[in-house]
Amino acid sequence: MTTSLKAVTHAQNIRYDKAAEALYIIDQSLLPNEEKELRLRTAGEMVEAIQKLRVRGAPAIGICAAYCLYVLARTIEEPDPAAFQARLREYSAQLCASRPTAVNLSWALGEMEKTAAAHLSDPRPVLLEALYQKAVDIHQDDIAKCRAISEHGLSLLKEGDGVLTHCNAGPLATSRYGTAQGPFFLAAERGMNIRVFADETRPLLQGARLTSYELHRAGVDVTLICDNMASMVMKNGWVQACFVGCDRIAANGDTANKIGTSGVAVLAKHYGIPVYVLGPTSTIDMDCPDGAHIPIELRDPEEIKTLWYEKPMVLPGVKCYNPSFDVTDHSLISGIVTEKGICRAPYTESLAALFH
Ligand code: MRU
């Protein structure tokens, strides 16, 4: 089932229809079996969509939250600017609490709150239009950043290389192209052959359900493996680099990404394979000194116990530990690829330089 490359890289995972005043997302929890748009109207629906990973991936969560806050702002009837702002902040806090690890969520909401503050004394339609424009800017900006990250990432690869990736950092998780998957699409556009090994990514199988779905449809050479097969694939010499996305990069380069990423990095070090983290500067949290300060989301044990099957796979009383992310130590990272270029160690200096 090969679709066109462009149909995959330009798919609209988040769409605001201005004429209909409606916000839609592709419900990623249904993929790859069903492609269905979901309309988000209320704060409750929005929080649920983020928590249940109907919209997921650090940049996508940020973009979606920006539009969500705009939609909610339109529903606030308080004529008093201070009361309006207080209500908007409540909505923002509600959205922000939906998932803790990806910093893009609080970053995008912070940008929206700043915009509202700057237009608080304007007539309400002007304020709302400024919020709409900000959400569009955040979205458009991510498109440009993903493209630049993909270019920088591709510069690290050569014809015929094999690359291992973990989780999903493609168009569904971002805007277009993606971050860690972006170079694979770009390579395909340019007729370059890259072989991708996609970890299935237990427990929610973003690698199987989303990464292999996107890459296969786009005609990229992708091989799906179980997470515990990565060592063998590396030992076989099939992988020349690992490309992973990120949910929060601390000031020292420690990087939170989908659970299992740090294990991939430890394995890669053993086999002498470079690990690159690809993400926009909006995923870098300079206020967070190191990985120990990154909040790690703990998710429902049912995700381990039942997977996507209807029948449980373990006895009901079995204890489970289900962290959604882990932190890869900066010493295991060969480079952090942002839209501004590739940062190398020492990251405390190279990351700080991005913001000067
Ligand atoms: O729990 P998820 O599916 O939102 O986790 C997503 C990841 O860990 C991605 O690798 C990360 O957000 C980067 S997306 C460009």
Image (cartoon, grey):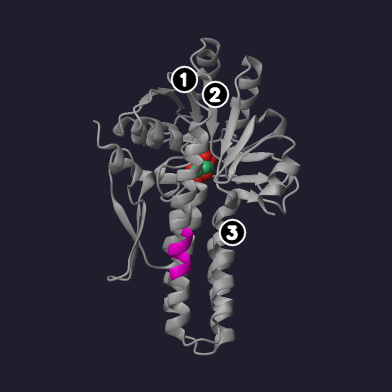
Which residue range is magenta in the image?
133-138
The x, y position of residue 290, in whole percent, is: 74, 44
Residue 301 visible, this angle: no
Which of the two labelled residues, at mark 2 and mark 3, occupies the earlier sequence position? 3
Q: Are marks 1 and 2 in contact (CB under 8 Å)?
A: yes
Q: Is residue 213 above or below residue 111?
A: above
Question: What amino acid is found at the position of numbered circle 2 in the picture?
Answer: Ala
Left or right relative to 194: residue 279: right
Question: What amino acid is found at the position of numbered circle 1 in the picture?
Answer: Asp
Badge 2 marks a residue whose secondary structure is strand
Q: How many neighbours does mark 2 have within 10 angstroms: few (below 14), some (14-19), or many (20 or more)? A: many
Badge 3 marks a residue whose secondary structure is helix
> Can you identify the residue that label 2 sits on?
241
Mark 1 and mark 3: Cα distance apart in space: 35 Å
> Can you identify the residue that label 3 sits on?
107
The x, y position of residue 314, in whole percent, is: 49, 30
The x, y position of residue 91, in whole percent, is: 53, 70
Residue at image coords 55%, 64%: 109
Q: How many neighbours does mark 3 have within 10 angstroms: few (below 14), some (14-19), or many (20 or more)? A: many
